[in-house]
Amino acid sequence: MIIREVQLEFDFTGALSVEKLDEPGQEHPKKMKFVDFVVETADTIYLIEVKDPSNTNTPPKELTRYVKILRSNELVDDILVPKCRDSYTYLHLMDRDNKKFIYIVLIALERLNIDTSLLPAVTSRLSARLKREGHKPWKRTYISSCQILDCERWNKLMPYKVRRVVERNFS
């Protein structure tokens, strides 16, 4: 199954099911934020969030802003954790939480002036925040593990490949 998220094309061949959870036009509970994909395998449900600041249409000013967001807590606290929590809550309430959940964030970094060695530190912050958002840690672990990957590491570690597809106009 091939699915596109703007300029990134994913080959989810082999997955039991793939759902584009944040599909525009779908009726979802108000004020909930959702990950891009829910991918189900025999024993795992992957919550997959895609961030593509390297999209060829992204202005250079936005690239600089994204580097700042990545280095701060804003990406983890205000974007990634709420999307994961709300997506899991939605699937739980729909009685679709009978397997372990893994949260994968793909950030296409090829146009950003950033060292990919920053990603493990951001992953650690994300993991900690998924376990504890308030003054007390959650009593229940809802995400088995999480990982933030760039496209190169995604293609090495994930069973599903990703590639950039840029359509060219020949007018």
Image: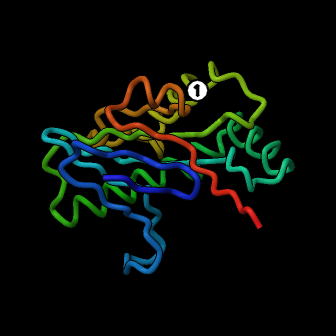
Any part of residue 139 in sight: no
Q: Position of residue 159 (x, y in %)?
A: 32, 32
Q: Residues within 10 Å of mark 1 (few under 14, many from 20)?
A: some
Closer-to-camera residue (24/119): 24
Residue farthest to the right, as pictured: 61
Q: Is residue 116 left or right of residue 16?
A: right
Q: In which image quadrant can residue 169 be found? A: bottom right
Q: Is residue 97 left or right of residue 105?
A: left
Q: Position of residue 160 (x, y in %)?
A: 35, 38
Q: In which image quadrant can residue 146 be found? A: top left
Q: Position of residue 122 (x, y in %)?
A: 58, 30
Q: Quadrant of the C terminus?
A: bottom right
Q: Is residue 87 left or right of residue 52?
A: left
Q: Position of residue 137 (x, y in %)?
A: 38, 38
- Residue visible at 68% across and 50% down? 55
Q: Is residue 154 left or right of residue 74?
A: left
To which residue does mark 1 refer? 119
Circle 1 SS class: helix
Residue farthest to the top, as pictured: 117
- Residue visible at 69% across and 44% down? 54
- Residue visible at 38% across and 76% down? 29
Any part of residue 9 in sight: yes
Closer-to-camera residue (48/124): 48
The kind of residue tagged 1 is Leu
Q: Check the image and report above or below for 24 versus 79.
A: below
- Residue visible at 51% across and 56% down? 5
Q: Check the image and report above or below for 78 versus 152.
A: below
